[in-house]
Image (tube, rainbow, N blue to C red):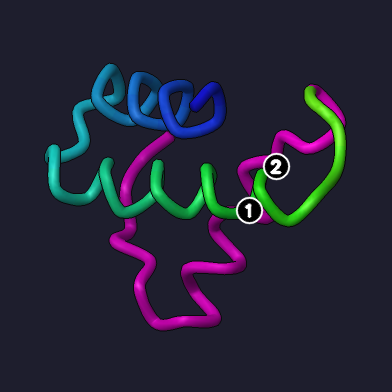
Amino acid sequence: GDAFNGALATLLAAGARVEDALVVANAAGGLTCTRRGAVEALPVREAVEALLRREGRWPGVPW
C-alpha cells in the first residue's frame, strides 16, 4: 500500500485528475509486488512511467 498511497498522494498534490492518479498509483503498487523486500521493492517514477507507456496507458500526468 505504501507505493500506491505515495503515488496517489503525489499526483493529487500535483493537480492530476483522480482517474489519472489512480492509474499511475495502481501501476506503482503492482510494480512493488514484483520484487522482494520493503523499501528496495518501491519503484522509481521512471519505472512506473515506462511500464504505463509500454502498455499504452500513460495518462501524461505531472509529477
> Helix, strand, or loop for circle 2?
loop
x%, y% of residue 10?
Answer: 40, 22
Q: Amino acid at mark 1?
A: Leu
Of residues 39 and 16, the one nearer the viewer is: 39
Query: Is residue 5 one of those drawn in magenta?
Result: no
25, above or below 34, in the image? above
> Helix, strand, or loop for circle 1?
helix
Q: Kindly check if marks 2 and 1 are in contact, taking CB atoms under 8 A apart as contact.
A: yes
In this view, the mark in front (2 or 1): 1
x%, y% of residue 14?
Answer: 30, 24
Q: Residue at x 27, y 41 (%)?
A: 21
- C-alpha span from label 2 to label 1: 6 Å
Packing grade of label 1 (10 A; few <14, some 14-19, many >=20) is: some
Of residues 57 and 62, the one nearer the viewer is: 57
Looking at the rendering, the stretch of residues picked out in magenta corresponds to: 39-63
3, above or below 35, in the image? above
Q: Amino acid at mark 2?
A: Pro
Query: Which numbered marker is on residue 48?
Result: none
Residue on which the image places disc 2: 43
Q: Is residue 34 rendered to the left or right of residue 3?
A: right
x%, y% of residue 16?
Answer: 21, 36
Residue on which the image places disc 1: 31
Q: Residue at x 20, y 28 (%)?
A: 15
Q: Residue at x 66, y 49 (%)?
A: 33
Q: Is residue 17 rendered to the left or right of residue 53?
A: left
